[in-house]
Amino acid sequence: MFWKGPVFTKNGFTGKGVDLKKCEIIDKLEGEEEGIIIPLFRNCHTHLGDTLARNIVPKNLSLSEIVGPSGWKHKWLSENNAKDSVLSGIKEVIASGTGLIMDFREGGLDGLKAFDDIEYPGTAILLGRSSKTLPGDNAGISSLADVGIIANKLAEQARNKGGLIGIHHSENQHEKIEPILELGPDFVVHLCHATHEDLVSIKSAGISVVVCPRSNALFGNLPPLEEMIELGIDVGFGTDNGMFCTVNILDEIRFIREKFPKLSMEKILTIACFGLDDMFNKDGSSAYSNLEQSGWMLLSRGAEDNFESVFSPETEILGVRWRN
């Protein structure tokens, strides 16, 4: 079975279609195209556990009052079934052609167990959170302002397990970068209020960055994304809390195109499909970054130009081929 149409790769659009059995690009196919083919998206920062709170989040609270250590979200999480919320979020993830999610899991070991028995054909990287012992292999730390020196303990435990370390930083106000450099995480989320010097330090330290512009903008924040890219920082896109935004990366990249007009559509789409490649390939063995093993998504053609078509609000997802 084949899909016919231009195929997006790290080198732009190429080929005439995809062999769906082998997940290989085909250079010669006859007949009319069926749409535009792109690799499955990577959503590099989610909180799926609060997805079902999307329509009831208070409108009059600040970001810290909602997601802070004793904020509205944590009260809601304590009173609701996290698994139901995660399942709702996963359904959105699957429907939006997302082949990788990196989910920060509140609730310790029980939070991680919310993913048990949930059928997701993509790759789910779960980053656990705890005040004492790290649940799972990966650490998803709220921020140094929230947890203080406990962050070092969680990071050490993750390293000993060969896991990833992620942490929120400078989301709603500027925070000093030096403690982050000392912690040495694999990636930092947000950096909306990072200075030029902060970004240079992040780049020099080889730390990757995940930005979530739609979520940030709800509270008057935006990351210096264009500067990050100019400096060559390894960047990924995320959608953040399910209660704030859909997990659909198409929604995210269309917003990013609007808010960051200096960025080319090709660059935005490349990050959406191949974000955090440097981090995943630090040891040169990441199977996920091997395009031949990646899945594909077929999009309807919403415009004559291939990139304009992907970003068109009229474009729809026609099919998803999950990787082998």
Image (cartoon, helix red, strand yellow):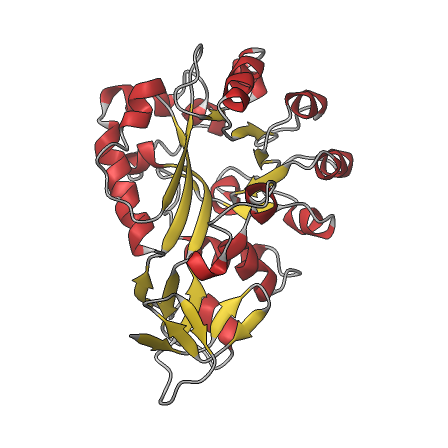
Residue 104 visible within the image:
yes
Q: Where residue 141 appears, x then y in whole percent? A: 50, 24
Q: Where residue 87 appears, x then y in whole percent? A: 24, 39
Q: Residue at x 51, y 37 (%)?
A: 219
Q: Residue at x 58, y 11 (%)?
A: 149
Q: Is 247 drawn above or below residue 198 in the view shown?
A: below
- Residue 77 placement: quadrant: top left
Quadrant including the C terminus: bottom left
Q: Is 257 drawn above or below residue 238 in the view shown?
A: below
Left or right? Give the position of 311 relative to 88: right
In-front residue for pair 33/293: 293
Q: Where residue 289 appears, x then y in whole percent? A: 51, 52
Left or right? Give the position of 90 relative to 213: left
In-front residue for pair 259/208: 208
Q: Where residue 132 appears, x then y in whole percent? A: 44, 10
Q: Residue furthest bottom?
A: 31
Left or right? Give the position of 12 relative to 89: right
Q: Is 80 drawn above or below residue 267 in the view shown?
A: above
Q: Residue at x 25, y 42 (%)?
A: 88
Q: Is 142 drawn above or below residue 234 in the view shown?
A: above
In-front residue for pair 312/287: 287
Quadrant including the N terminus: bottom left
